[in-house]
Image (cartoon, grey):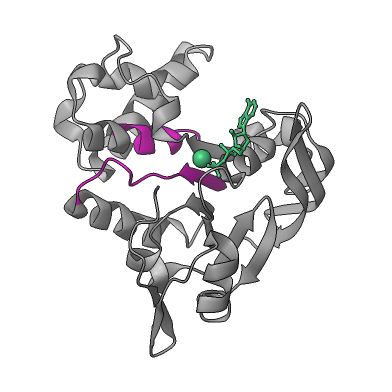
Amino acid sequence: MPAISTENLTVQYGDYYALENLSVEIEHPSLVVIMGPNGAGKTTFLKALLGLITYSGKIRIFNKPPQEARELIGYLPQRDTINMNVPLRVKDVLLLPLTSRSLSIKKEYVSLAKQNLSRVGMAEHWNSKFGALSGGQQQRVLFARALMTNPKILILDEPFSATDVKTKMSLINMLHQLKKEMTILIVLHDINPMVECTDRVLLLNKKLIAYGQVSEVINEENMAKLYGTHIPVIQRGNVCYVMGGDRHA
Ligand SMILES: Nc1ncnc2c1ncn2[C@@H]1O[C@H](COP(=O)(O)OP(=O)(O)O)[C@@H](O)[C@H]1O
Ligand SMILES: [Mg+2]
């Protein structure tokens, strides 16, 4: 069974079409990188999968509609959509989504939260004020938070936008491990550090431009279609690198 399948997925904001007739099938487990220019509908696509916005067409998450599949997905939203000044401590950021559950379950979650926090190298910040952390540290805490429900699907919207190179590399190493057991969807502007662990690339600009393996999809023709400008691509072995660097306009 695929982790995710969509058929003619279309999303409108008023008269504006943000996503048009997107049909795609994502295997489980796999790591899929989503690329596209600003305003391409990448975040919109993820929100539709999460059941956060209305859409037309069909979405199935492990054969369920999004509204019934929310528990299966861990989500790290795009940084500029999160209020980073919440007056909470790190432990509360991790445990807050679980406050509605019973006390005995909570105890288990406290140890899970500590475990996830040390996975992202933030163990010593259990009691720190979230708002006082650096952008990259906050991002790591939110990454740990997305793992709290032991999701089968992990959705990461531009997770490296505030991280330094060292943090980025350690998170990528984590993704290498996690992708053995879960399906990971990750929006990136710079695919280069991840080409080796990417199973499929989805190029999106309102419509599906291309979907396939890195070596099939990452080429100058598709980059030109996607970004509307020439971007050099070099091939090394069966790996491709986009020489435009970070396309974040
Ligand atoms: N809530 C909304 N209401 C109206 N327009 C929106 C809303 N959210 C996004 N849009 C518009 O839809 C388009 C796609 O947005 P988005 O999915 O955030 O793109 P991306 O994540 O690829 O940068 C953009 O033009 C954006 O301005
Ligand atoms: Mg976005």
Could you tell me which residue is drawn at 26 percent across and 52 percent down?
Answer: 168
Q: Is residue 138 above or below residue 131?
A: below
178 or 241: which is nearer to us?
241
**View quadrant of ligand 1:** top right
- Residue 148 highlighted magenta (yes or no): yes
Q: Is residue 129 above or below residue 237?
A: above
Could you tell me which residue is drawn at 42 percent across and 16 percent down?
Answer: 96
Residue 31 location (% of width, % of height): 51, 61
Left or right, 224 with reference to 160: right
206 or 177: which is nearer to us?
206
Left or right, 83 with reference to 182: left
Left or right, 206 with reference to 73: right
Left or right, 206 with reference to 189: right
Boundaries of the magenta span: 141-164
Residue 44 location (% of width, % of height): 63, 38
Q: Quadrant of residue 23?
A: bottom right
Q: Quadrant of residue 244?
A: bottom left
Q: Is residue 62 above or below residue 179?
A: above
> In this view, which residue lies farthest toward the front?
229
Quadrant housing the N terminus: bottom right
Residue 17 location (% of width, % of height): 75, 39
Residue 125 location (% of width, % of height): 17, 27
Can residue 28 be seen here? The reply is yes
Could you tell me which residue is drawn at 52 percent across and 53 percent down?
Answer: 184
- Residue 43 highlighted magenta (yes or no): no
Could you tell me which residue is drawn at 48 percent across and 62 percent down?
Answer: 180
> In this view, which residue lies farthest toward the left?
124
Can residue 26 be seen here? The reply is no
> In this view, which residue lies farthest toward the top?
87
122 or 75: which is nearer to us?
75
